[in-house]
Image (cartoon, rainbow, N blue to C red):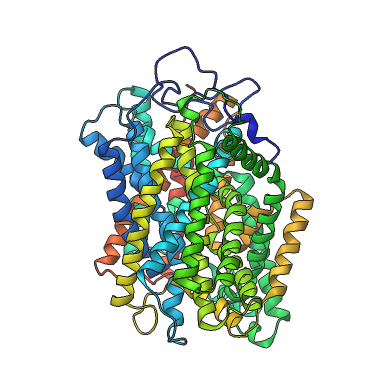
Amino acid sequence: MKEQLTKAQGRPEAVPADDVDPIALPDNAFTELAPGETYRPVMHPRRDYAEVTPYSVTMGLLLAVIFSAAAAYLGLKVGQVFEAAIPIAIIAVGLSGALKKKDALGQNVIIQSIGACSGVIVAGAIFTLPALYILQSTHPEITVNFLQIFLSSLFGGVLGILFFIPFRKYFVKDMHGKYPFPEATATTQVLVSGNASSSKSSGGQAKLLVVASLIGGIYDYVVATFGVWTDSITTTAYTWGQALAAKFKFVFSCNTSAAVLGLGYIVGLKYAFVIFAGSIFVWWVIIPLLGAYGAPEIAAMAPGDIFREYARMIGIGGIAMAGIIGIVKSSGIIGQAVGLAAREMKGSAAKTAEVRWQKDIAMKYVAYFIFLALIAVLLFFYFGVIHNLWQALVAWVVVTLIAFLFTTVAANAIAIVGSNPVSGMTLMTLIVASGVFVAIGLNGASGIVASMVLGGVVCTALSMAGGFVTDLKIGYWLGSTPKKQETWKFVGTLLSAATVGAVILMLNNVYGFTGDNALDAPQANAMAKVIEPMMTGGETPWILYIVGAVLALLLNWLGVPALAFCLGMFLPLHLNTPMLVGGLISWFVNRSSKDKEVCKARNERGTLISSGLIAGGALFGVFAAVTIMCGKSVPTNGGEFVPQVLGIVAYAGIIAYLYLASVRGKKH
């Protein structure tokens, strides 16, 4: 991060003299700006718009509650938390159209921003806190209550918001065009589509987005709900593939989701290839080596089990070290953000005019709020969790340092690949924190509770930081007021935290997290498995973490994006392969003509179609969740021959659609 934060502080943008708002995104929305070039958002930077209204706030809060409940159930049931930002944006656009609201764009951004609190708060809570229920079976003295779940989620979300605000201008403005922001791109295209009815050309874009959304959504819904074809093509579905897996621990797999394919297109070939390289390094090098030369119990394991139990730990160590490298590289940015807040508190900051479009909550207020939030966290740890002042202070210091320093790491991950490795970073946080707690005498059941509640705060903070950069990038592209987004994000966080706490308690009472017919809660089970031995004298795979850390150092030295590579090591192969497929389609579309302008138009069309595939997949993912909640069983035909063949055919069809529809683009 060579750019300096101060470049973006307090300087009004040079705005074109024209007073007409564009219907669609400007041509330079997704490209780096040339020297002297400025970006003009859809909503005029110097004009006021309806943003925070009773309608937008009410709808945002209502959708935050609904999506928090749905995401919590699905996440605990199958381990996948769907991204709420896109379906909420679709609902906002649909409602504003049905109600015939004029100038609805600013209000829709606020609805999306408030409502999107649901997904990030849910991820932070369900990845960690259900582990307390899971460990009650072996440690009956562990107690869990609503206040612990609610305050853990609330304080984590608040810290994530406050810690990210000083970095907003760097990520969303200074780095314009340098990060793909796949999820933000798709959400922005959805919101712009609702602004396009008065323009014939933009109306055509909106129609294309709707068609792509329906194709991607119905495609993914059929797979997720009825299992007509497999959701993941794999070599283990065939006899020869099973032999390869058994003898050499070799597996190849590819998710057939239209949404992930679209995500890969927007990420592009560069980052998609690095992510895939990290994945095949684990699956085609590390796992076969462990299977061939590891202990007998490892050699007897299936490749997927070796990945979960051993190889993935290398990725976690790599992510942690890549995060530390990122922190070191951004130390200047962090220092300037802290310095700016200090100067504002002293009243010595330069008084410069800021346009509405670049106005944040004042840094001095951010600093005050951070101070109050941290005091509240300390009191929560002391009175609600640990009951020992010294140990509570140590826990408080660990949470504060990790949540603040890894804020930029979470934002980077979302900006690059649209996926936040929050569970990996939280797992490393729990390991470090547990080691510290054991050293100061906090172990056993009380240590487990302290670690998991602390992990809930950190996990939610990092999840919020990653999600918030998406919201603010959307606002930047469209011209919203950051201060309004930042202010109302706190309200959405409060309501989402309360909803998630109530849903977790309800699901535990109805289904439970252990025993027959219990909710799977895969991430929370993984956290419980790691923490329990540390708190009760077990072993921790430090060697695997260290190997990952050394690998990240070498990658950084060689100039390879370490975070992207290690993300590939951490995420399953079947999710990384379609990223590469989408990146390759983008590469071919960009080279489908000798005329650069034609290629540019085709790539823009491909980005719009990919945004539709992501949007449709996200929205129909909600429909699938509702269907499952109504009693439909989750399909389990992934390894059968016929669904595999049908999956290959269907996936080839969606690939052909993305490419052929993209190359129909013409010069403007």
Decide if residue 528 is on the left or right side of residue 52: right
Q: Is residue 241 above or below residue 444?
A: above
Residue pictured at 47% horizontal, 72% vertical = 385
Residue 397 showing in the rendered view: yes
Which one is in front, 243 or 145?
145
Residue 227 showing in the rendered view: no
Residue pictured at 29% horizontal, 55% vertical = 66
Q: Residue 146: which quarter of the image?
A: bottom left
Decide if residue 296 is on the left or right side of residue 392: right
Which one is in front, 579 or 350?
350
Q: Quadrant of the N terminus?
A: top right
Q: Residue 533: which quarter of the image?
A: bottom right
Q: Residue 167: which quarter of the image?
A: top right
Decide if residue 554 is on the left or right side of residue 535: right
Residue pictured at 37% horizontal, 26% vertical = 202
Give percent across and percent down for residue 197: 30, 27
Q: Is residue 74 above or below residue 408?
A: below
**In the image as oriented, which residue stretches furthest toward the top?**
17
Residue pictured at 48% horizontal, 25% vertical = 26
Q: Is residue 645 above or below residue 217?
A: below
Decide if residue 649 is on the left or right side of residue 65: right
Give percent across and percent down for residue 617: 38, 51
Total numbered labels: 0
**In the image as oriented, which residue stretches furthest toward the left?**
99
Give percent across and percent down for residue 307: 60, 72
